[in-house]
Amino acid sequence: MRGAMRLAPLLALLSACAATVAPPPPATLQTPAAWRSAVGPLAAAPAPERQWWQSFGDPALSALVQTALAHNGDLRIARARVAEYRARIGVAGAAQRPTVSVDSAPTRVRQLAYNGVPYVTNVYQAEFQASYEIDVWGRLAAQTDAAAAGYHAEQANADAAALAVAASVASGYLNLRGLDAQLELTEATLKLREQSRALAQRQFEVGYSSRLEWLQAQAEYQAAAEQVPQLKRQIFEQENALSILSGGNPGPVARGAALGELNPPPVPAGLPSDLLRRRPDIARAERNLVALNASLAATRDQLLPSFKLTAVGGVQSLKLHDFLNAPTALWHLTGLVAAPLFDGGRVQAQTDAAAAQRDQAVYAYENAVRAAFAETENGLGAVQRLREQALENDARRATAAETLRIAHNRYRNGYASYLEELDAQRTLYSADVGRLQLRTRILVASVDLYRAMGGGWAP
């Protein structure tokens, strides 16, 4: 006890020899109390489920996402990095445990005796060596903590990659179903345009209408026909992109529910503060900061003395028979204290660099949180505004349909030219295309919102 009390002032004096660490930058992050945009009864809506894509009710979509999560190339790389960082914890932790080695070195030496006569000597020996560094200052523990925090950061990075892949696959599939619906609408419209063109041609041939009306009907048919190969090309490219994203080769993608059967899931609940524990990219930034703080502590303590114990024991003999039956036992025990006296400021410079890296991690964490707030705000606002736009589109489409009905009756009864009906058909087609695109955008906006709110990920 007295010895420990005598050592305490010495340890305190030695600890003052550690490198100087600059204080971290002051926090500038402020968490808002609520979102600017509110869509629906947030208090009654559940938090996002981990497999939130199943809320769309499309088995084909769910199967595609599951395939991507299992086979996506970027995700496989991220998971391999997790395994690498898990192994690094073992590497760092091994420094806190003793090391034991054994070696055997039979030696035959020819040398000169004191009288100048050469002679040959055989030496047989085997040696065991054990060494252990006493972690007085916690430097080795800090290195292990840094490795553990790096491992958790890579886990969060893999979760962030999985969330991004799931969202990309869901968005791509929904866009694909939107293109399918547009192609179906365009092909149906093309059949109507073909009928209208044939009618206009017959009426021109019998002298009931002018050549202008017939040419206009021909132009409308060609405009609709032009959209078909364009949409097919977009569908082809979207299928290939989804196949690659799912870890396969370019090819077709299985379809499930039609666009009109897909309903966006309810807007998930949550306050801005919830993102701090739900978003994996925020967790990754936070754990990177923890890792750099631990690395900074280990770097700072390099100027402090290190204490090592080494024990060596073995057997030795000049004859093989004696070595196997009655060898001579040899051993020694060493207590080593080593401390740098002058390093030209290397450790202090390394500490300053580590402190700067820590500051960068602080700023990166704040940037990640602010970006998460912005993405969620934009997602909520997009869902709200797109729903409002869809209501206006419904009204526009109803007006266009009524306009076409009136124009068709006026043309059939001879009160208006066919050009008036063609113009009404064009307006209705534009409204129908806009309706499909808006529905697709609402579904994709729901995916973006679920990704922005963490997608059900939990630490």
Image: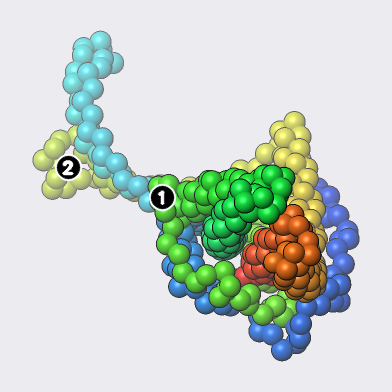
Q: In what element is the residue under mark 1?
A: loop
Instruction: Give the amino acid type for the residue marked by disc 2 in the picture.
Output: Phe
Residue 193 point in image, percent of width and height: 60, 55
Q: Nearer the viewer, residue 195 or 279?
A: 195
Residue at left offset 84%, top offset 70%: 31
Q: Say whether residue 14 is left or right of residue 71.
A: right
- Of all residues, the one furthest to the left in this rendering is 321
Can residue 242 be seen here? The reply is yes
Neighbours of disc 1 within 10 Å: few (<14), some (14-19), many (20+): some
Residue underneath mark 2: 323
User: Can I make out residue 98 in this image?
Assistant: no
Q: Where is residue 279? Give x, y as percent.
A: 67, 66
Which quarter shows the C terminus? bottom right
Quadrant of the image for the N terminus?
bottom right
Q: Quadrant of residue 393?
A: bottom right
Please tell me which of labels 2 and 1 falls first in the chain: 1
Q: Tag 1: residue type?
A: Gly
Q: Which mark is residue 251?
A: 1
- Vertical comparison of 205 with 135: above or below: above
